[in-house]
């Protein structure tokens, strides 16, 4: 690792030894400190000696040691100490975790690099000035030039070097950029470089903003990892154009600052893209967990009847065997056990298919039977909290739906209503009303649909809450995750229906589904959401 580090450091030093002042290491782009900082973050102060050796060899091999042996050793020692202090601060701020995992960490890193490089630069240039290697009156100019070189080099190069420094980072970088699309935006970046600069020795950077196009492409599609590769390749291309054309008369420091700003903008976009993807993945996982919780309740309810029946038939078989009866009665009991077992297996299979593919088993679901079956599950809770449940007369209509999933939605609405009425003061009337009616409305995408309304005597939904009620992690309950309504609406929309809340002094939630007689004609067109 030491040999590889020193070799890479010298290669970086030689490749970027462009337009130096006074034959010293005062160049507009110094990516080698980025390599040293990453080496320090990985190995701590054990990296100091190899780093100092690389600095000394760079002065000897690349520049011919213009400051003499003694001063070269001293200056290299200071650079190791100065850069090492930046590494210490980065290590304390970020620990052993990722340096570029969030926007906050990105800007912290930028501030540390900016302040550390400037401080390091001031001391280094002061030593050179005291040694008489810098002409009088040029101290400010060389400080700015060397500071720009270090800052640009670290900002542009360190993210990619950091990613390459660990096996996990290399795997993620490979998985992110090892695609045909990467070749596309890299080829596009070369075309843009040719378009913007053409002959770089006469370029005035008028069309530099075109370089944002490949960076935005990489950042929006591949996040921070794609951006790190893109900005490093752009910087490499610009440096190669300047070095190979010996274009030392152009404003190289200005060009490098433009590239640094390009990198900062690209990294900001890339990190935002990564954060949004992470939030999206976490949300999907949370919704799956919420669905698992809701479906577990549905599974327990659905399996209760076949399991109870299996137990009863099993005892009947045991009784018949003890009596020595092996005729038609025993055969009939065994057949019923098989049927109930198949019924239980069907419930499990449907839930498994729903979680794997989101598929549904559509069938006519009678509104009255649906409300009755779900209401019975709340009998104990209603009596315990002295809540009255009024179920109005249900019209003899059926919806085309997956009964298991629609029960889940109605169960969630009743549970929310029960929580809402429990918040009322003692002595207040606690009531939940369930009603149904047929609607003829274009609003729900069908000429005719069935609407179920769950109304409670709770405090209701405000306009502010109604606007955000169906967003993930928004809940009016202190212990709520805010995922039940999100899941319920997703189920309703997968059925071609809708779920909404109305603003009022009392809680009013409504769910609407197409009637079975209308939706049945299009049953084959229903697919999982």
Image: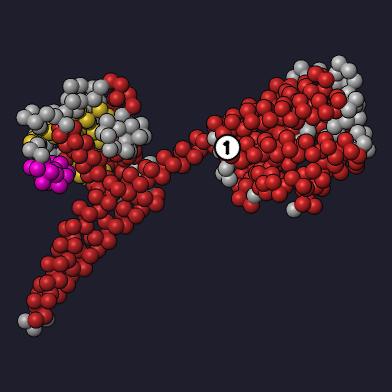
Going by the image, does 145 lie left or right of 434? right
Going by the image, does 80 lie left or right of 435? right
Q: For residue 254, which quarter of the picture? A: top right
Front-most of residues 389 and 13:
13
Q: Which residue is mark 1?
A: 93
What is the magenta range?
368-384
Q: Is residue 457 magenta?
A: no
Residue at 16% from the left image edge and 28% from the top image edge: 458
Q: For residue 411, which quarter of the picture? A: top left
Q: For residue 290, which quarter of the picture? A: top left
Residue at 74% from the left image edge and 33% from the top image edge: 153
Q: Would residue 488 be seen by someone viewing this image from the given angle?
A: no
Quadrant of the image containing the C terminus: top left
Residue 412: % across, % down? 23, 40
Front-most of residues 369 and 150:
150
Going by the image, does 304 lie left or right of 70? left
């Amino acid at each position: 690792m030491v040999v590889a580090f020193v070799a890479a450091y010298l290669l970086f030093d030689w490749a970027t030894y462009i337009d130096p002042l006074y034959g010293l290491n005062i160049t507009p782009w110094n990516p080698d400190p980025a390599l040293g900082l990453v080496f320090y973050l990985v190995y701590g102060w054990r990296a100091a000696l190899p780093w100092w050796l690389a600095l000394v060899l760079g002065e000897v091999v690349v520049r011919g040691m213009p400051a003499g042996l003694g001063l070269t050793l001293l200056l290299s020692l200071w650079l190791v100490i100065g850069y090492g202090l930046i590494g210490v601060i980065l290590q304390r701020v970020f620990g052993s975790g990722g340096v570029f995992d969030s926007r906050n960490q990105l800007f912290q890193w930028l501030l540390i690099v900016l302040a550390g490089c400037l401080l390091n630069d001031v001391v280094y240039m002061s030593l050179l000035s005291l040694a008489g290697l810098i002409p009088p009156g040029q101290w400010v100019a060389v400080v700015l030039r060397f500071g720009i070189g270090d800052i640009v080099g670290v900002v542009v190069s360190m993210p990619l070097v950091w990613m390459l420094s660990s096996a996990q980072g290399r795997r993620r970088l490979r998985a992110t950029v090892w695609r045909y699309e990467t070749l596309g935006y890299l080829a596009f970046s070369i075309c843009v470089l040719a378009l913007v600069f053409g002959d770089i020795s006469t370029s005035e950077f008028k069309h530099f903003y075109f370089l944002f196009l490949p960076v935005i492409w990489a950042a929006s599609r591949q996040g921070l990892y794609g951006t790190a590769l893109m900005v490093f390749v752009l910087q490499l291309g610009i440096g190669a154009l300047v070095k190979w054309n010996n274009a030392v008369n152009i404003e190289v420091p200005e060009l490098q600052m433009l590239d640094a700003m390009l990198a900062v903008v690209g990294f900001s976009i890339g990190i935002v893209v990564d954060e949004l993807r992470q939030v999206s993945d976490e949300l999907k996982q949370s919704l799956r967990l919420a669905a698992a919780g809701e479906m577990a309740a549905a599974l327990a309810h659905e399996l209760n009847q076949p399991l109870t029946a299996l137990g009863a038939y099993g005892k009947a078989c045991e009784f018949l065997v003890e009596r020595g009866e092996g005729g038609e009665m025993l055969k009939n009991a065994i057949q019923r056990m098989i049927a109930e077992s198949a019924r239980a297996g069907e419930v499990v299979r449907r839930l498994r298919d729903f979680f794997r593919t989101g598929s549904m088993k559509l069938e006519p679901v009678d509104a009255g039977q649906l409300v009755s079956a779900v209401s019975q599950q709340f009998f104990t809770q209603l009596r315990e909290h002295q809540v009255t449940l009024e179920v109005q007369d249900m019209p003899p209509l059926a919806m085309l739906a997956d009964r298991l999933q629609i029960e889940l939605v109605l169960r969630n609405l009743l549970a929310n209503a029960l929580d809402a009425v429990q918040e009322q003061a003692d002595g207040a009337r606690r009531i939940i009303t369930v009603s149904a009616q047929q609607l003829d409305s274009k609003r729900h995408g069908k000429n005719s649909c069935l609407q179920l309304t769950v109304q409670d005597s709770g405090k209701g939904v405000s306009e502010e809450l109604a606007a955000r009620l169906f967003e993930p992690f928004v809940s009016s309950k202190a212990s709520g995750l805010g995922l039940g309504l999100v899941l319920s609406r997703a189920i309703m929309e997968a059925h071609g229906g809708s779920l909404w809340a109305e603003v009022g002094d009392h809680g009013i939630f409504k769910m609407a589904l197409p009637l079975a007689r209308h939706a049945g004609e299009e049953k084959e067109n229903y697919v999982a959401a």
